[in-house]
Image (spheres, rainbow, N blue to C red):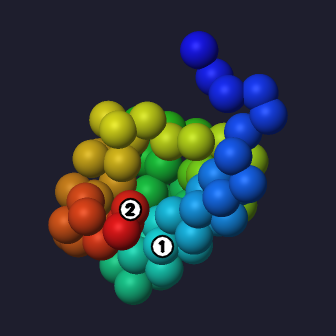
């Protein structure tokens, strides 16, 4: 059951993870569209993750880490 309201630290942490996804994608030389195609997601979904509108699942994070050739821990640390 989700916490209502969520803890104060949650949104800043989501933004931080989104920024790390974006940085890793750019470092890999990929556009949102290219990353989306590699992992089977729409480019709008990638955008939503990068800007903390939505939360990627663990499976999504694993796919992203593989696609951009970075350890999962680097995305969520």
Please name whichever residue, 23 or 28, is drawn nearer the observer in this view of the structure: 23
Q: In this view, does 61 lie above or below 59?
A: below
| Residue displayed at 48% across by 79% down | 23
The residue singled out by tag 1 in the image is 20
Element at badge 2? helix
Q: Is residue 55 above or below residue 74?
A: above
- For this orientation, the residue located farthest to the right is 5
Q: Which mark is residue 5?
A: none
Element at badge 1? helix
| Residue displayed at 27% across by 47% down | 62
Q: Is residue 64 above or below residue 4?
A: below
Residue 32, how many percent across, how many down? 56, 61
Question: Is residue 19 found left or right of 11 in the rendered image?
Answer: left
* Dot 2 and dot 1 residues touching (CB under 8 Å): yes
Specify which label sits upstream in the sequence, 2 or 1.
1
Residue 30, how many percent across, how many down? 44, 72
The residue singled out by tag 2 in the image is 76
| Residue displayed at 59% across by 62% down | 13
User: How many neighbours does mark 2 have within 10 angstroms: few (below 14), some (14-19), or many (20 or more)?
Assistant: some
Q: Is residue 59 above or below residue 12?
A: above
User: How many neighbours does mark 1 have within 10 angstroms: few (below 14), some (14-19), or many (20 or more)?
Assistant: some
- For this orientation, the residue located farthest to the bottom is 27
Please name whichever residue, 10 or 29, is drawn nearer the observer in this view of the structure: 10
Circle nearer the viewer, 2 or 1: 2
Can residue 54 be seen at all in this image of the molecule? yes
Q: In which quarter of the image is residue 8?
A: bottom right
Separation of disc 2 and disc 1 at Cα? 8 Å
Please name whichever residue, 68 or 20, is drawn nearer the observer in this view of the structure: 20
Question: Is residue 29 found left or right of 32 in the rendered image?
Answer: left
| Residue displayed at 38% across by 62% down | 76
Q: Quadrant of residue 39?
A: top left
Residue 70, how many percent across, how many down? 23, 70
């Amino acid at each position: 059951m989700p916490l209502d309201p969520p803890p104060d630290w949650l949104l800043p942490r989501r933004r931080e993870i989104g920024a790390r996804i974006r940085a890793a994608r750019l470092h890999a030389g990929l556009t949102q569209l290219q990353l989306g195609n590699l992992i089977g997601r729409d480019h709008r979904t990638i955008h939503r993750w990068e800007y903390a509108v939505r939360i990627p699942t663990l499976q999504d994070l694993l796919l992203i880490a593989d696609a951009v050739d970075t350890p999962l821990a680097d995305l969520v640390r």
